[in-house]
Image (cartoon, grey):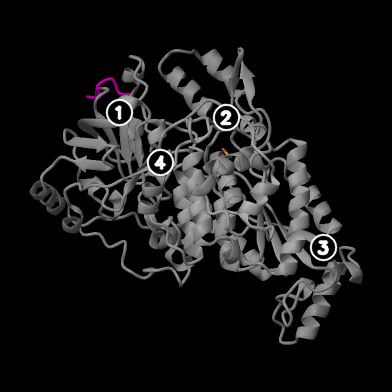
Amino acid sequence: MTGSAAPAGRASGIRRGLTSYGDEGFSLFLRKAFIKGAGYSDDALDKPVIGIVNTGSGFNPCHGNMPALLDAVKRGVLMAGGLPIDFPTISLHESFSQPTSMFLRNLMSMDTEEMIRAQPMDAVVLIGGCDKTVPAQLMGAASAGVPAITLVTGSMLTGGHRGQRVGACTDCRAFWGKFRSGEIDRQEIDDVNSRLVGSVGTCSVMGTASTMACLTEAMGIALPGSASPPAVTADRVRIAERTGTEAVALAERGTEMSTVLTRQAFENGLRVLLAIGGSTNAIIHLTAVAGRLGIRLDLEDLDRMSAETPVLVDLKPTGTYYMEDFHRAGGVPAVLRELGDLIHRDAPTVTGRTLGEELDAAGPGFPSDIVRPLTDPVYPEGSLAVLRGNLAPGGAIIKQAAVSTHLLEHTGRAVVFEDAADLAARIDDDALDVTAEDVLVLRNIGPVGAPGMPEAGYLPIPRKLAEQGVKDMVRISDGRMSGTAAGAVVLHVTPESAVGGPLRLVRTGDTITLSVSRRVIHLDVSPEELIRREDELGPPSPPAAARGYRKLYVSEVTQADEGCDFRFLQSTELPDRDAPRDVVHPRSLIQEPG
Ligand code: FES
């Protein structure tokens, strides 16, 4: 392929988006002069340009295979007659992002959007992997409006510890829990630290990174079969090469992301999220990406789908296996095949073919313990449930497939922690008045409150209870939890306490009812008493910031039910975008459960 990749009348390749000097001819002359300094010929500069987002970083081992992927994508682009040019953006790793990667996701999305828009490219390959990178790239590219295709870095390999197979990061949490409870000693926890991560790549379980990888494939914005190959395999490199080739075809067709990521595509994404036992974080991310395209995702839709979509994939943290097993079991096409009519087969994909056509081309399935048939699921409903009630008028999420059965219906006494610092100071205090039947409540870790909605919603079991063998308790917060974690953990309580949500009214000693079957989270305190407490507390005073990105963040971030995107980044087509959603009046929120 040579020459123009843009629709007639629009500049293409290196001629796109010229720098403003007031003289277009001079702008192009100057641009070509500079890039020729890097050795490019006029012939090369006449090709369609495929931008490649390079998120390699010494601080991001989840993207440690970036050089190999870049080589392969470029090879694919060149094979198809395009000119590949990679460029850097922000890269986020979960463990190297202070205060939390979620705080920085929107910044990465802005960087991605503006760099795609600012630089001349006919299509862009988004290489991401670690939890927040893929959502940030989808959000940014959706707003930039340039044809885009996602390539994930792929999962890490598992390791071995004293005869046991281990992988990040479900096993990280399990071993740390054993260390806290005294089951294993300092020597063993130090030993396993070197065994949990077997290679570069993203977490080896169905955490947020693996979930987002599967969803990009299910939504048709990444190639069929691209979600599951581990980072260091030949399959991963071949997928990268083919992604480069497809990017050139995508540029030729000029297919923008909005053509692929339709409401049907998001419904396919939600369906697969439920069937794979995916991360709760993905709901926030999908909502944010959809919001960039003018599509409002509704928690009620998710809950309706959950009732009819069983969990089919037996991966940690809800199940047994790891991502490399999922790949051998057929990956996402195997799941889509099993879901049958629950999937919109006519949804378009980035290849120009429909999801159904791609599935047919992928060939027949085969029996597996890892991707189970609809008739023999891992869990009879979807992995996630949406809770409502006077504690969460805007909704809350629970990963029901990961809850200890005896806690699915539970009433207990609240033990309240004011914020993350209070939790850290008291959770392991022997004097803490707490039993296994109590409900741990942590507030002020929401989008505004922390800020950045940290993954602190997975409260540790108080040490004295852990030492007695307690493995799970009901825990409630306005924060998030890692996709690699599991337990009776109620998350994303909306509105958050820092902006006046009813979570701020809970007191130690109150009674709280969780009923997953009835989808209820309820504070058993009279409306009159809640109003009295509200009057006593006065209006909420969310944390302020004096300057910089933090100031922008706390003033613009939306609540979890809007994807925690910045209001001004959402599509102007988004229904009710300008409605005053963050104004919270407790009297309107305090209601009896339905
Ligand atoms: Fe990067 Fe888990 S830390 S995917």
Residue 589 picture location, percent across and down: 21, 55
Q: CA distance from mark 1 to mark 3?
A: 56 Å
**Residue annotated with mark 2:** 370
Which sits earlier in the primary sequence, circle 1 or circle 3?
Answer: 3
Name the N-terminal-most of marks 3 and 4: 3
Q: Please tell me in which quarter of the rendered image ligand 1 is found.
A: top right
Q: Give the residue type at disc 2.
A: Ile
Left-right relation of 23 to 565: right
Task: Give residue 384's mark.
Answer: 4
Residue 32 picture location, percent across and down:
84, 73
- Cβ atoms under marks 2 and 1 closer than 8 Å: no
User: Which badge, 2 or 1, is on the more N-terminal residue?
Assistant: 2
Depth check: give the residue in front, 8 or 437: 8
* Circle 3 Cα neighbour tier, 10 Å, few/some/many (<14 / 14–19 / ≥20): many
Q: Is residue 249 left or right of residue 216?
A: right
Q: Residue at x 81, y 77 (%)?
A: 30
Count the labels in the image. Answer: 4
Which residues make up the magenta segment?
428-435
Q: Nearer the viewer, mark 2 or mark 3?
A: 2
